[in-house]
Image (cartoon, rainbow, N blue to C red):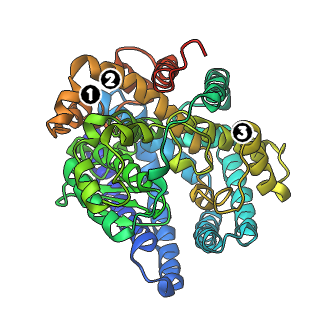
Amino acid sequence: MDNKEKLEKIKEWEFKKSAYDLVIGTTYFDDETIAPPAGQEYRYDRLSYMVAESYKIKTDRTIKALLEELSKEDLDEVTDRHIALLYKGFKKLEAIPQDLYAQYTKVTLASTASWHEAKKKDDFTLFKPHLLKVIELKKKIAMLYDPQKDPYDVMLDEYEEGMTKADYDEFFALIKSEILPLIEKIKKAKPIRDDFIYRFYDKERQALLMTKLKEILNFDPSWGYMGVSMHPFTSGLSTDDVRITTFYDEHNIASAIYSIVHEVGHAFYEHQMDKNLEGTILRDVSSGMHESQSRLLENYIGRRESFIKNYFDFLKELYPAQLEDVDIVSFTRACNVAKPSLIRTDADELTYPIHILIRYEIEKGIFDGSIDLDHLEDVWNDYYMNYLGIRPRSAKEGILQDIHWSDGSFGYFPTYALGSALAAQIMKVVEEEIDIDRHLEDGDIKVITDYLKENIHRYGAIYDFKTITRIATHEDFDPHHYIDYLKDKYTKLYDLKGA
């Protein structure tokens, strides 16, 4: 069998994999959004079966032999990368026995269901036993894959290729040394008025605002769909089937606004990848790079007055009483307020990386044994008190706020801070190329998404985080751009010069 025939076999195999992934992904999206809760047990039984069948296909021994042979060949740059990623993923999955894989699937499905129930009832004890099972299995799987490596390093690499605790420790040390003192200065500065953000905003009219925002953002219904879930997320089922969700908080109008802008940032990445990558592992892009695109749209575009102008009059028409005494300048300033808060997804730009720092340090402690799992909720609350000076009053606004741990996504959180930092570096280059405010005032966001497509999105996972960073910014990743951006923005906003 020559290389051409081998690659054709790989293509057929990857098509089968993607077919199962589509069914599993669609079922998951429906389960989080529109599926009736009474049908959950039936869905989960069938979903577990589909995952087990998918495992059999993904660990086909004949395919492993082909991947091993092709990995030794010098083909072309894209094909070599494709084969390398497939082979790495194959070996990782193969290290997990099928019965353990099936067990993990059932445990995480049950865990996710218990998280939903626990969050609704605001009771961590309902979720805790499920979480402990997930932690135990996650550590076991990591050690099976690479017994010589720190289990948490294995998990970090799963979401950001090549990243380790040492890398993140250095990154977060910079965040602590530079951002925490700035937060303390702002605590003592004159507050910026934002009380009107937290007035009552009914869900029905918020939904109308979301429709308006989708139009402004060019989130086209021919390829994009928005639902509602307890925790906002994006599912890129294919280039032309990208689904996002939002969540309506009737006492925080900014929550849904920035939720949808954030998720549309993810959605454009999924939509604007080269269609030749469809159905392949080359769509499984760096988590940090993916997050840089959502944070870029949410913060570096969405919090500008030039962007807010596109919907502000409509927002005032929807809520005349709530915003009667508010002009666009005041609203924009309120959307950029920095103050310690408990909910990560609603956090401002400045305090956001501290939310991630907290999760990173807790996850490290979970897997190196330095944290007592019996007192995990207390640990969480203590971290918030130590770093942000606030303590959660309930599990819902504390340890139960994120869905990630329920499905075993340990190692994912750090990429959120990594992406936030990279977004600053990317925007520095974008602003040199494009008059952003002029285009936004004209209602033209396409010039920005086109730029991101050309320099980032189209590559998918052909290149890793470091390489795409160099392509997009002409230099290696440098978090000091992020630090400089935050210092400059908030020093001006709060008039901290000389403070």
Question: Residue lying furthest bottom in this view?
Answer: 38
- Give the Cα distance between marks 2 and 3: 30 Å
Could you say where residue 173 lies in the image, as x and y percent from the top left?
A: 67, 24
Q: N-terminal of the two: label 1 or label 2? A: 1
Q: Is residue 320 above or below residue 296?
A: below
Quadrant location of the N terminus?
A: top left
- Give the Cα distance between marks 1 and 3: 33 Å
Kind of element beneath mark 3:
helix
- 234 or 43, which lies in front? 234
Q: N-terminal of the two: label 1 or label 3? A: 3
For disc 1, the marked residue is 455
Could you say where residue 392 lies in the image, as x and y percent from the top left?
A: 71, 54
Kind of element beneath mark 1:
helix
Closer to the camera: disc 2 or disc 3?
A: 3
- 123 or 67, which lies in front? 123
Kind of residue indicated by mark 1: Asn
- Identified at 22% across, 44% down, the residue is 310
- Side (left or right) of 228 relative to 44: left
Which quadrant would residue 185 be assigned to in this image? top right
Q: Is residue 299 above or below residue 260?
A: above
Kind of element beneath mark 2:
helix
Q: Specify the label residue 207 is tagged with.
A: none
Q: Residues within 10 Å of mark 3 (few under 14, many from 20)?
A: some
- Identified at 31% across, 62% down, the residue is 226
For disc 2, the marked residue is 472
Answer yes or no: do the residues labelled 1 and 2 have beta carbons within 8 Å? yes
For disc 3, the marked residue is 361
Could you say where residue 344 lies in the image, as x and y percent from the top left?
A: 56, 48
